[in-house]
Amino acid sequence: MNVSWKSLSCFAALATFAAGCQSQTSPPPAEASAIVEADGHDHAEHEHGDGGESDVKLAMAELSPEDRKEAETQKFCAVMNTSLLGSMGAPLKLDVQGQPVFVCCAGCKSKALKNPDETLATVAKLKAENSITRE
């Protein structure tokens, strides 16, 4: 049998690749990686309930009646706009250019304040979308 060096090199590379693939761990679940922000903020670190309706109601009840009404109008975090306000404990109220803005946790506070125009645009969008679903 006549085997060339090129064939042996290809075989060795393929064997190395296959061995490397077998030793790799499986990737984290998609939902876990989806909650890590680009700045390293990881919502999986937080203590919170299952985000069920009763957890949200309890967390929202910690706000004043005025703040609760405002947070319910916004409904989602101004930074992690898929995170329901109250699903990670009482939402935090921020003042962004004189306007009330709610975030789901302390980790989102700095990002909201760092990009005030973007934050306010997101809040306006969230409120508009929420008013459509309420009608």
Image (tube, rainbow, N blue to C red):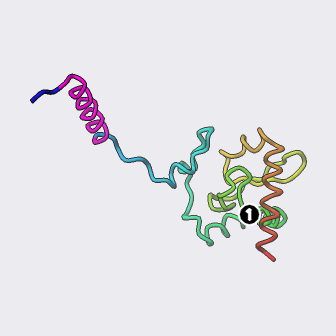
Name the residue located 34 percent from the left edge and 44 percent from the top edge: 25
Front residue of 7/66: it is: 7
Q: Give the residue type at disc 1.
A: Lys
Q: Main secondary structure of the magenta part?
A: helix
Give the extent of the magenta segment: 4-22
Q: Position of residue 100 (x, y in %)?
A: 84, 54
In the image, is residue 48 above or below residue 13? Answer: below
In the rendered image, the quadrant that contains the C terminus is bottom right
Q: Label 1 belongs to which residue?
A: 75
Name the residue located 57 percent from the left edge and 58 percent from the top edge: 48
Farthest residue toward the bottom?
A: 135
Q: Is residue 15 magenta?
A: yes
In the rendered image, the quadrant that contains the N terminus is top left
Q: Position of residue 42 (x, y in %)?
A: 57, 46
How crowded pointer 1 is (Cα within 10 Å; few <14, some 14-19, many 20+) is rated as many
Left or right of 63? Residue 97 is right
